[in-house]
Image (tube, rainbow, N blue to C red):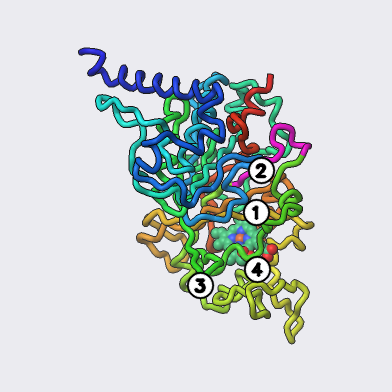
Amino acid sequence: MSSKDDPKLQARRSFLTRAAGVAAAAAGSVISPAHAHAPAVGEGVAHGRHPENDIESFWGSHQAGIATPQQRNVYFAAFDLTTSERADVIELMRSWTSAAARLTVGAPALPINPDPEAPPDDSGEAQGLAAHRLTITFGFGSGLFVKDGVDRFGLNQWRPEAFIDLPRFPGDQLVAQRTGGDLCVQACADDPQVAFHAVRQLARLGSKVAQIRWAQAGFLSIDKHQPSPRNLMGFKDGTMNVPTANAVQMSQHVWVGEEGGWMKDGSYLVARPIRIALEHWDRMKLAFQEQVVGRHKLSGAPLGKTREADPIDLDAVDGDGNPVIPENSHVRLAAPASNEGAQILRRGYSYDNGLSFIAERWPPWHQGMEFDAGLLFMCYQNDPRTGFVKIFEKLSRFDMMNQFVTPVGGGMFACPRGAAGGEYVGQHLLEHA
Ligand code: HEM
């Protein structure tokens, strides 16, 4: 067999070609913001895409995809590192940074390889599509620091105190195949194929050193008549959130400060697919559904109020002296006032994975196919101990919503600051001596 026919050698050759591109990127020119925003002729517009439209800047002190107004679709993926060499992780993050900078302006992940004998470097399903506000956000899982008791990359000394392992919460039914990961990629776009395409290219680029572990696609419907998206329970979701345009509140709750060292200007992501028992929920009376959430379903207003934006009054009582917003309602238990001021930036998406077989252990002992659907809950914060963990310790014990929702996977990821001026994402951690 000639080397031309040997798929292993071909794969290797193509990896080396890519590695050479990556090395050039590392040298500064390819991943500098100026160049990444200007793909070569033939890679953007002439490739059939419209990079001038709907572009969210990839470069900046914060990674895009955190404070960026939510796009309609997400493709979230977690990866396991299959190497124990820090140099490989550095090369991976360099190539991913370079590719992300290109993808987010509507260009293919790599410069076009004109060799018709080689597999195309970009799979091509985003050709002809606009950038659709694609953002690509990278995060590091705890496995980058210690995995199975081993500090593979010599990085554990730099693990920030805030980057704890998530405790096991009551009600968690985490499936190993949907949990954890050494790295994560959150690709958000106003088009599902653009988001999927981005992760697919990154998975392919990194395949020598990073194996995809779990992934979840999600969607969110918004239009001018419905600016607040509704989740699959039919309620408006995202009404009370950290205002992303308010720099003071973002610093207070979302962006890591000086104390974080290499994590300064980054943020911690908690991403957990939470299954919702939709058939069960749909059997509940409207009034009960509203008591569970603590808001009116149609308007999104807090119980006892009329408009979505009306403030929640946790002290309000009805004629019998009972709280208008029930003690165990979701919004009361999640509110900052119930959690010593804790706030998180929620950025969740609904998901639909088709159907799965359910056998209930309690009356009416239903057996059969049910929707495998729910919420890919995602939130960003500058300290998970005083953010997600603080709030969810209470919710996981007392929330009336728990009878309908089950966390089935996920993890926590440290999303470092954004890249600027020829840097790659994660450089401040990975190049620590
Ligand atoms: C399937 C799971 C969940 C569903 C369906 C859900 C749904 C909702 C809805 C409908 C609201 C009211 C509208 C709003 O203010 O956005 C809300 C508020 C909220 N949720 Fe969730 N949620 C879920 C899981 C969680 C989890 C895991 C947390 C985190 C720890 C959380 C934290 C919050 C917070 C902080 C608020 C705002 C409370 C306030 O300040 O009024 N939620 N959620």
Describe residue 143's horizontal placement relative to residue 432 as left or right: left
- The residue closer to the viewer here, 90 or 182, is 90
Q: Please check the rendered image and state whether residue 177 is part of the magenta-colored stretch, yes or no.
A: no
The quadrant holding residue 164 is top right
* Residue at the disc numbered 2: 267
Tell me which label, 1 or 2, sits earlier in the chain.
2
Establish if 353 lies above or below 264. below
Determine whether the residue tagged by mark 2 lies in a helix, strand or loop: strand
Instruction: Give the distance between the C-alpha atoms of the residues marked 3 and 4, in whole angstroms.
Output: 28 Å
* Residue at the disc numbered 4: 329
Disc 2 versus disc 3: nearer the observer? 3
Instruction: Give the distance between the C-alpha atoms of the residues marked 1 and 4, in whole angstroms.
Output: 20 Å
Q: Are marks 1 and 2 in contact (CB under 8 Å)?
A: yes
* Residue at the disc numbered 3: 225
- The residue closer to the viewer here, 97 or 239, is 97
Q: Quadrant of the N terminus?
A: top left
Please give the label number shown on residue 219.
none
Ligand 1 under 8 Å from disc 2 Cβ: no
Identify residue type, mark 4: Ser
* Residue at the disc numbered 1: 345
Q: Quick one: label 1, few (<14), some, or many (20+) residues within 10 Å?
A: many
Tell me which label, 3 or 4, sits earlier in the chain.
3
Identify residue type, mark 2: Ser
| Callout count | 4
The percent position of residue 346, horizontal first and vertical second, equals 61, 55
Identify residue type, mark 3: His
Q: In which quarter of the image is the C terminus?
A: top right
Q: Residue visible at 61% across and 35% down?
A: 419
Is residue 401 at least partly visible in the picture?
no
Q: Residue visible at 65% across and 38% down?
A: 417
Is residue 117 at least partly visible in the picture?
yes
Establish if 236 lies above or below 371. below
